[in-house]
Image (cartoon, rainbow, N blue to C red):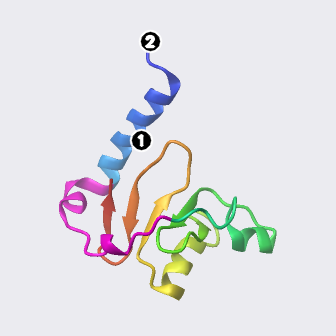
Amino acid sequence: MTQPNERRRRAVDRLRGLLWGRHLRARPCTHRDQIRDVSPASKGCAACIELGDSWMHLRMCLICGHVGCCDNSKNRHATQHFHATGHPIIRSAEPGENWMWCYIDQVLLT
């Protein structure tokens, strides 16, 4: 029998394929050289914590370590961080997820 984590990983991979499609994975990212070895700056979305708000999922900036909430969250702090700083690459900060996203090239990185 398949373990729950394995089932979840397969489901996420299928969903990722449907959402992002091959055309996004085929395009190159021209910002990989900006990725740094960073640690999360906070244990949750720093701005939401300050506001007393909640979030759906967390994303971490791979340039500075800023942790912000995803675009499905009310405040979209990860994307706001990108617009404020120009830091192009984030990764999921959710357990079991290891994908990255480049805002500028609009490409999913694995």
User: Label for residue 45?
Assistant: none
Element marked by disc 2: loop
Q: Earlier in the sequence, mark 1 or mark 2?
A: 2
Q: Which residue is mark 2?
A: 1
Q: Can residue 50 be seen here? A: yes
Residue at left offset 31%, top offset 48%: 18
Answer few, some or many: residues within 10 Å of disc 1's Cα (few below 14, many 20 plus, some between 14 and 19). some
Q: Which residues are magenta?
A: 20-37
What's the amino acid at mark 1?
Val
Q: Please identify the quarter of the rendering in which residue 60 is found.
A: bottom right
- On the image, the x and y values in percent for residue 47 come to 70, 74
Q: Is residue 25 magenta?
A: yes
Q: CA distance from mark 1 to mark 2?
A: 18 Å
Residue at left offset 36%, top offset 41%: 13
Q: Please identify the quarter of the rendering in which residue 43 is found.
A: bottom right
- On the image, the x and y values in percent for residue 32 come to 31, 70
* Count of marks placed on residues: 2
What's the amino acid at mark 2?
Met
